[in-house]
Image (tube, rainbow, N blue to C red):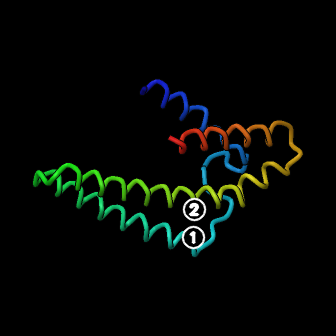
Amino acid sequence: MAEKNAATLHVAAACGCGAHTKSRKALAVDPEIKISNLKRLRRIEGQVRGLQRLVAEEHYCADILVQISSVQEALRSVGRALMRNHLRHCASEAIRDTAPGRADAMYEELLNLMDMHSR
């Protein structure tokens, strides 16, 4: 499994938008989305600390599993917002670009992201 994840990370490391030679940063980020995502991630961080406490205190397994499901859905929500931003800015620019291979690299990056986040 670790080998598969390492291979996926290696493939995903090539930036499809081509805008990042040294630093991988988004081409554009809506400030409201950034603030919203940061709030969500702080809330998720608190939920995970709560999970640690539930496990340490040996709470009922089913209750812990419900809370884990809640955290996973919250992370999926952040992932959807990030994917939306990526599609709107980085991906759309790369796909419209006429530079050889840039659109194909973005298609591969998007396929890898969808595969990774569909599990």
- On the image, the x and y values in percent for residue 59 come to 14, 54
* First of labels 2, 1 by sequence position: 1
Mark 2 or 1: in front is 2
Left or right: residue 32 versus residue 4 is right
- On the image, the x and y values in percent for residue 97 come to 85, 49
* Dots 2, 1 in contact, CB < 8 A: yes
Q: Residue at x 16, y 52 (%)?
A: 60
Q: Residue furthest right?
A: 98
- On the image, the x and y values in percent for residue 74 come to 43, 60
Q: Residue under circle 1? A: 33
Relative height, residue 42 to residue 9 (above, below): below
Camera-side residue: 93 or 111?
111
Q: Residue under circle 2? A: 81
Relative height, residue 54 to residue 103 (above, below): below
Q: Which amino acid lies under the numbered mark 1 shown in the image of this protein? A: Ile
Q: Which amino acid lies under the numbered mark 2 shown in the image of this protein? A: Ala
Q: Residues within 10 Å of mark 1 (few under 14, many from 20)?
A: some
Q: Residue at x 68, y 59 (%)?
A: 27
Q: Residue at x 36, y 67 (%)?
A: 43
